[in-house]
């Protein structure tokens, strides 16, 4: 039985081929019938023209040369991360980050560290308003990460040439943002040089002979608030000594609300170089209540409050055992204490604000003594140690502004009489 079955299989093979061929021919005929004829030729030799429907006009033949031209005009196919996109009104290009693109994460990890900012000279700015203020002041952008093209179109086009523009997902920006409500754009800038910056004309017009010196300020929120108050009061510049938090840290930038681009900021100074950044004949005043001690001294009461007040400096400079009774009295600079609302702006003035934890440094007291300055007291209710650093700075700066305004008004009044 195996032999006949084998013969039957061989006999069926050509039959299957014929069926397949007929099926193919049938498909061809069906396909031909579906086509709309253009011209019909009858057996008698008569030819009848058929018009096409309006929506089925024949395609125009394209010469072979045009195909060659189009082939040369087409851009080369690249990966999604390298495909440039352009908008006509700006003529700029941006890259679109593909899934798994680590450019944003790698940049954010590095630029958020202070050693990198100091070594590479780059800072991170976030938010449309802060970036616009930076560009207006002349800050140099390097890279922009954004989630919507409209955010970049709001920026000056002439300052975006040569800048890397990378479009990323909003979720990626949200992961690295320090804002409660991210605004969808982040920029890497070259660290601004206060000498090369262009500050607002109104700020320069209202600038006062008043300098703020920050000493041992380590809270980002306090420093940002102080910078904001300095810009509002019209300080000519702000000096930050070593030991302060970095002025370009994201939290300081957020608390500053654009003050970084309204008043010159000189960062990370040694105390030996501070006088080089002060105008000639500047008197340095120290905001240091020292608790109840300053109020007792103003009342001419005797006691050991001065020693209790000044022991905190020993922690950084000398040990208490090394000082005898006489040395204890002469070790610290002797500065007269003056109420903050008395006149202290007869000459160009500089105010030193210390941190809440460590207070002002010994070097600040020595600088105040060498320039003929004093300690400025803001009276508080007994039992209250001291004010917040940002609050004390705001009170003193705006008091200095008030005193200077009165001097200008008196001067103009005297001129009008003469």
Image: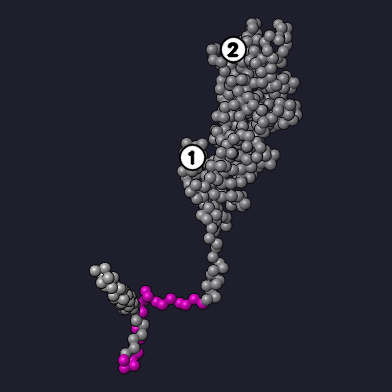
Above-or-below relation of 356 to 145: above
Q: In terms of image quadrants, where is residue 326?
A: top right
Whole-percent x and y of residue 332?
70, 14
Q: Tell me which residue sits at (61%, 17%) in the image.
A: 289
In the rendered image, the vertical position of residue 193 relative to residue 44, given as above or below: above
- The secondary structure type at the circle numbered 2 is loop
Distance between the Cα atoms at labels 2 and 1?
47 Å
Question: Do we see residue 82 in this rendering?
Answer: yes
Q: Residue at coordinates 28% horizontally, 73% vertically from top-left? A: 7
Q: Is residue 346 above or below residue 264?
A: above
The one of 268 and 156 positioned closer to us in this rendering:
268
In-front residue for pair 119/20: 20
54 or 131: which is nearer to us? Answer: 54
The image position of residue 374, as x and y in percent, is: 68, 19
Looking at marks 2 and 1 on the same chain, the residue that comes earlier in the sequence is marked by 1
Quarter placement of the N terminus = bottom left
Q: How crowded is mark 2: few (under 14 residues within 10 Å), some or many (20 or more)?
A: some
Q: In this figure, which residue is indicated by the disc labeled 1?
A: 175
Q: Which of 317 and 125 is in front in this view?
A: 317
Q: Which of marks 2 and 1 is in front?
A: 1
Crowd around label 1: few <14 · some 14–19 · many ≥20 (10 Å): few
Magenta-highlighted residues: 43-63
- Whether residue 131 is visible here, answered yes or no, is no
Membership of 50 in magenta stretch: yes
Question: Where's residue 380, x and y in %?
Answer: 56, 16
Which disc, if any, is residue 292? 2
């Amino acid at each position: 039985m195996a032999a006949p079955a084998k013969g039957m299989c061989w006999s069926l093979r050509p039959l299957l081929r014929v069926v397949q061929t007929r099926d193919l021919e049938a498909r061809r005929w069906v396909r031909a019938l579906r086509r709309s004829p253009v011209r019909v030729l009858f057996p008698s030799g008569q030819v009848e023209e058929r018009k096409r429907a309006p929506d089925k006009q024949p395609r125009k033949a394209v010469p072979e040369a045009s195909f060659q031209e189009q082939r040369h005009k087409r851009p080369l196919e690249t990966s999604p991360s390298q495909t440039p996109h352009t908008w006509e009104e700006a003529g700029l290009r941006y890259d679109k980050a593909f899934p798994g693109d680590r450019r944003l994460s790698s940049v954010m990890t590095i630029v958020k560290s202070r050693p990198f900012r100091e070594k590479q000279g780059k800072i991170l700015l976030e938010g449309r308003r802060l970036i616009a203020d930076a560009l207006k002041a002349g800050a140099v952008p390097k890279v922009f990460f954004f989630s919507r093209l409209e955010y970049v179109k709001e920026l000056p086009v002439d300052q975006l040439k040569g800048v890397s523009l990378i479009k990323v997902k909003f979720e990626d920006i949200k992961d690295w943002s320090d804002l409660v409500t991210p605004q969808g754009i982040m920029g890497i800038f070259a660290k601004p040089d206060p000498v090369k910056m262009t500050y607002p004309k109104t700020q320069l017009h209202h600038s006062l002979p008043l300098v703020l010196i920050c000493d041992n300020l380590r809270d980002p929120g306090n420093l940002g608030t102080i910078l904001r108050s300095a810009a509002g009061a019209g300080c000519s510049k702000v000096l930050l000594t070593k030991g302060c938090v970095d002025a370009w840290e994201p939290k300081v930038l957020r608390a500053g609300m654009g003050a970084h681009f309204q008043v010159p900021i000189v960062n990370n100074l040694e105390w030996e170089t501070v006088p080089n950044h002060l105008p000639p004949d500047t008197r340095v005043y120290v905001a240091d209540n020292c608790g109840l001690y300053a109020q007792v001294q103003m009342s001419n009461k005797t006691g050991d409050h001065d020693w209790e007040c000044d022991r905190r400096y020993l922690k950084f400079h000398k040990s208490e055992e090394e000082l005898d009774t006489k040395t204890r009295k002469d070790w610290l600079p002797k500065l007269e204490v003056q109420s903050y609302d008395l006149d202290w702006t007869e000459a160009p003035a500089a105010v030193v604000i210390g941190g809440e934890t460590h207070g002002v440094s010994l070097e600040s007291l020595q600088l105040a003594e060498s320039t003929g300055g004093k300690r400025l007291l803001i009276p508080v209710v007994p039992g209250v140690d001291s004010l917040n650093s940002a609050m004390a700075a705001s009170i003193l700066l705006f008091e200095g502004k008030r005193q200077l305004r009165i001097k200008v008004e008196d001067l103009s009044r005297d001129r009008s009489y003469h």
